[in-house]
Image (tube, rainbow, N blue to C red):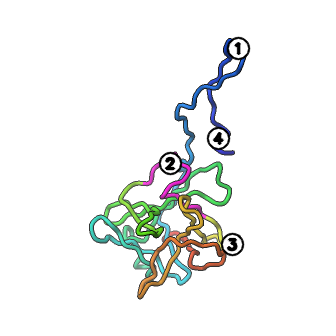
Amino acid sequence: MSCAEIRMFAVEFRDDFHLYFAEDEGLECDYWKKEHSLQQQIFRNTSNQVLVVRPGPGNDVMTAFEFLADQEIKAESGVNFTIHYYKDYSLDEGLAVAFSIRVENKTYCMYCAHEGGRNIIRFKEKEVPREILENSSDIIFIQKSISPTNTKAFKFESSLMRRYFLAFQKEENLSKLILKQCEDEVDQSTHIMVSQKK
């Protein structure tokens, strides 16, 4: 069921016995509404590296996948993500999610951006909204299962930039979080393992 199927307008019969619908006065249905959240989620790539978010210059943050022992994963250490799940009646290909993280007493939200001719991942200091009324959003990703037997492995596709997925890419000594265009189902760089902090 899509939003368009549940919209209702006032109607009236006029003197000519024709049925008239009232004008659409900007009525919108809630396209995404937050249902619940999972806290303290750790993201790992296929090399078992943990996604770490650290403060950068200015108000920006930096991200990279790093090897971390379980005892190094502490509260507000830049690795404990919250996954926010949104209800979407029109989405049948996966779950609508958004990601936030607390770093040095600030909450950052992950989003997609187009900069310098490239689609990239950024973080901005803000809370994840309870409702999103747009058809696509820079903070919403579609969580897709990779395998029915592996319940912790997912691909995350941007709802705004379709066919672009969260991925990791090795650059010099770092594995960076990127947004990657991908048509290949078996591209392991787009496979993200999600587990709760122990």
Taking the spot 55% from the left edge, 69% from the top edge, the residue there is 165
The quarter of the rendered structure image containing the N terminus is top right
From which residue to which does the magenta span run?
128-143
Closest to the observer, 181 or 195: 181
Callout 4: 10 Å neighbours few (<14), some, many (20+)? few
* Marks 2 and 1 in Cβ contact (< 8 Å): no
- Please determine whether, in this image, residue 86 is positioned above or below residue 11: below
As drawn, the residue found furthest toward the top would be: 15
Callout 2: 10 Å neighbours few (<14), some, many (20+)? some
Q: Viewed as shown, does residue 154 lie left or right of 42? A: right
- On the image, numbered disc 3 is attached to which residue? 147
Q: Nearer the viewer, mark 4 or mark 2?
A: 4
The percent position of residue 101, horizontal first and vertical second, equals: 41, 64
Label drawn at residue 132:
2
Q: Amino acid at mark 3?
A: Ser
Q: Nearer the viewer, mark 2 or mark 3?
A: 2
